[in-house]
Image (cartoon, rainbow, N blue to C red):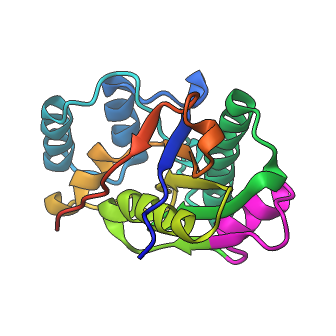
Amino acid sequence: MTRPRPVYLVDYACYRPPEHLRADFRKYMNHARLTGYFDDSSLEFQRKILQHSGLGDETYLPEALHEIPLQPSMAKARQEAEEVIFGVLDNLFSATGVKTKDIGVLVVNCSLFNPTPSLSAVIVNKYKLRGNIKSFNLGGMGCSAGVIAADLAKDMLQIHRHTYAVVVSTENITQNSYFGNKKSMLIPNCLFRLGGAALLLSNRSSDKRRSKYKMMHVVRTI
């Protein structure tokens, strides 16, 4: 039995949205009131959830949820996905200097937005990744999807030698907010925000010194 190959996390990038998409506590509550979708009881419930959520005033919402009337269309959802994904990948590639043709594995996870063509296909086309890349698009897996994606990339790096794997993890909320007065359905509105992250993993021994971490274990609980 062969020894497992070391897998290194070379670097990572997180998406920082533009300031005009900021949704601090006051702005969120004012906007929720202006939409006309929520009664006083629902507004008060959202206020309490936000106060105890641990979210600060530097969280963000996609453009469609800042508009009056709201515009949760497929086009706006795709816009959100592309801005986040391209934003984190541009930062990751700039920081690491990795050549896109050296990337052998791509894993994308986004539970709630799964368009055709897939988000992974959009990335392959945008960055002209190589034709034989092992590309995976994970959907519908909820909050454990990011760990599942990292584990899948790690497993692929045990099979394919001397290559890089990119993991992109995001969630799309443009079309997945709730506009009603059922309180249990309002909780995700208060907790989920715009964002995403990308990881560059490597099994190349030459990346050992410059990597931020060595991946030892991937553990998730249900």
Any part of residue 26 in sight: yes
Residue at (68% x, 56% y) in the render: 163
Tell me if 16 is positioned left or right of 23 in this view: right
> Which quadrant is the C terminus positioned in?
bottom left
Q: Is residue 117 magenta?
A: yes
Q: Position of residue 216 (x, y in %)?
A: 34, 49
User: Residue 122's image quarter?
Assistant: bottom right
x%, y% of residue 24?
37, 25
Task: Tell me what residue is drawn at x 65 percent, y 36 percent.
Answer: 92
70 relative to 11, above or below: below
In front of the other: 94 or 139: 94
Q: Is residue 206 left or right of residue 16?
A: right
Residue at (61% x, 56% y) in the render:
165
Note whether residue 114 is visible: no
Where does residue 189 sit, x and y in percent of width and height? Answer: 32, 50
169 left or right of 27 in image: right
Q: In the displayed orientation, state which residue is furthest to the front.
A: 1
In the image, 28 versus 126, the foreground residue is 126
Instruction: From the top left corner, tell me how far across and down residue 10 is, in percent.
Output: 56, 37
Numbered marks: total: 0
Residue 174 part of the magenta segment: no
Q: Which residues are magenta?
A: 116-135
Q: Quadrant of the N terminus?
A: bottom left
Residue at 43%, 64% (x, y): give it.
Answer: 3
Q: Is residue 183 above or below residue 27?
A: below
Rendered view: 50 above or below 184: above
